[in-house]
Amino acid sequence: QERNLRLNFSEPFIVVGQTLLIRKELADKVKSYKDLNDPQYRLTSKIGTTGEIVARKLMSKAQYHGYDNEPEAVLDVVNGKADAFIYDAPYNVVAVNK
């Protein structure tokens, strides 16, 4: 509380949500994150991020593999070793356009 009295905190200027990058083959099958909550699916994200928390809490039935960095996790999806990558929306927007 003492810190709050000495510093001025600004209002948030952006709210970032989690999004999924999924394999193209699943585009007609997966319409929601809930569809991935199944042991048949393998999910990836970066270790220690909100994406990992989301995977473990909201899709706990799916297999999960965390990575030290985002590009490795995305490559698993691109190469068909994983079904989806969970991460911040701005990163995924850039990644999908590469």
Image (cartoon, rainbow, N blue to C red):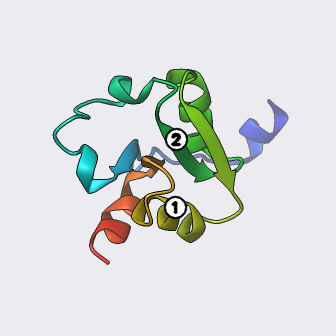
Q: Position of residue 44 (x, y in %)?
A: 55, 48
Q: Quadrant of the N terminus?
A: top right
Residue 70: image quadrant is bottom right
Q: Is residue 95 left or right of residue 82?
A: left
Asked where in the image residue 92 lies, by quadrant, the reply is bottom left
Q: How many marks?
A: 2
Q: Residue at x 80, y 41 (%)?
A: 3
Q: Is residue 28 above or below residue 77?
A: above
Residue at 44% from the left image edge and 66% from the top image edge: 79
Q: Of residues 34 and 48, which is closer to you in this image? A: 34
Query: Which of the 4 quarters of the picture holds residue 53?
Result: top right
Say which residue label 1 marks: 76
Circle 1 sits in a helix, a strand or a loop, which is it?
helix
Q: Which numbered circle lies on residue 42?
A: 2
* Residue drawn where x is 33% and y is 25% of the image: 35
Give SS at disc 2: strand
Distance between the alpha carbons at the discs numbered 1 and 2: 10 Å
Could you say where residue 76 lies in the image, as x and y percent from the top left? 51, 61
**Which is nearer the eye, 60 or 97?**
60
Q: Which three-letter amino acid code belongs to the residue tagged 1?
A: Asp
User: Which of the two residues, 52 or 38, is positioned nearer the viewer here?
Assistant: 38
Q: Disc 2 marks which amino acid?
A: Arg
Q: Find out whether the residues at labels 1 and 2 contact each other: C-beta distance under 8 Å.
A: yes
**Residue 27 at what x, y percent from top left?**
21, 45
Which numbered disc, 1 or 2, marks the residue that appears first in the sequence?
2
Image coordinates for residue 90, horizontal then vertical, percent? 38, 60
Q: Image height check: is 95 above or below 31?
A: below
Name the residue at 57% across, 50% down.
Answer: 45
